[in-house]
């Protein structure tokens, strides 16, 4: 399978970067073909600009948006690797969604998920987080996080297969933190097993 891996962290040598490296190793071991989109390293411009409204005026979208959409279109599955900041994704990744997942492409203009190019693609998210699992559950952050991504973003675009891995207590529990490195590799080996190739429009 062709897997697009979107990485959103300003430091490639961060713990999130280590998780990414391990995950990529797992994907390679499973025989997947990988395309890496390192949004910070590539200087992706995340701010929505007036030209991004071209979708509503029957004009071509900006070249950088079309480039990212092409990456998605040629993938069979998509993985997002990013840290949880303020109970959400980094602004860089939010901007990627804002600009790339445009109307008439990621979702139909009449909000019918069947008009999207995204159905059939599995999404896998690996998200290092500082707080404990208990803390997330106590305040409902885990459910809010999943609803934000699974319901408010992905299912809105017709995605029905999403797998979220929150890696709790990074840096607070050394033993647990280190255990996430081999876990990320295992996720890479298994997450896309048995997933069919989506029908390309």
Image: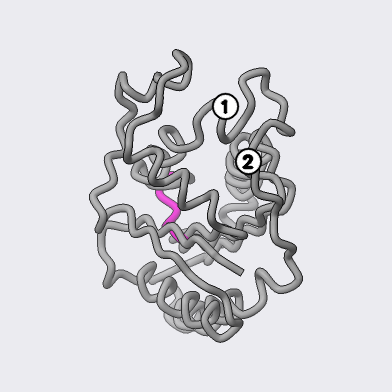
Residue at x 25% of width, y 58% of height: 41
Q: In which quadrant is the N terminus drawn?
A: bottom right
Label 2: which secondary element: loop
Name the side, left or right, on which 48 lies relative to 170: left
- Horizontally, residue 103 falls left or right of residue 82, namely right
- How crowded is the residue under tag 1: few (<14 C-alpha within 10 Å), some, or many (20+)? some
Percent x, y for residue 26?
54, 81
Residue at coordinates 58% horizontally, 81% vertically from top-left?
31
The foreground one among 160 and 178 is 160
Mark 1 — residue?
104
Q: Quadrant of residue 145?
A: top right
User: Which dot marks residue 117?
Assistant: 2
Cα–Cα span, label 2 and label 1: 9 Å
- Per the rendered image, the range of residues in magenta is 81-86
Question: On screen, 61 above or below 23?
Answer: above
Q: Label the magenta part by its dominant secondary structure.
A: loop
Measured as percent of width and height from the top left, residue 132 is found at 53, 62
Height in image: 155 above or below 18? above
Regarding mark 1 in the picture, which secondary structure is present there? loop
- Please tell me which residue is depicted at 66% across the width and 59% down the height of the picture: 163
Where residue 80 appears, as percent x and y from the top left, is 50, 57
Q: Which one is in front, 152 or 69?
A: 69
């Amino acid at each position: 399978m062709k897997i697009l891996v979107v990485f959103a962290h300003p430091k490639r040598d961060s713990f999130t970067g280590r998780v990414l490296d391990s995950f990529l190793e797992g994907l390679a071991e499973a025989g997947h073909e990988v395309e890496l989109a390192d949004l910070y390293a590539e200087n992706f411009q995340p701010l929505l600009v007036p030209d991004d409204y071209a979708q509503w005026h029957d004009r071509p979208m900006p070249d950088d948006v079309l480039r990212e959409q092409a990456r998605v279109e040629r993938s069979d599955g998509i993985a997002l690797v990013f840290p949880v900041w303020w109970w959400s994704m980094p602004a860089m990744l939010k901007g990627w969604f804002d600009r790339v997942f445009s109307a008439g492409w990621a979702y139909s203009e009449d909000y019918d998920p069947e008009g999207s190019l995204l159905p059939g693609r599995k999404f896998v998210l690996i998200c290092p987080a500082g707080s404990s699992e208990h803390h997330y559950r106590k305040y409902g952050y885990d459910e809010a996080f999943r609803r934000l991504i699974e319901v408010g973003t992905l299912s809105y675009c017709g995605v029905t297969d999403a797998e979220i891995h929150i890696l709790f207590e990074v840096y607070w529990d050394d033993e647990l933190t280190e255990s996430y490195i081999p876990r990320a590799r295992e996720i890479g080996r298994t997450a896309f097993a048995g997933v069919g190739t989506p029908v390309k429009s």
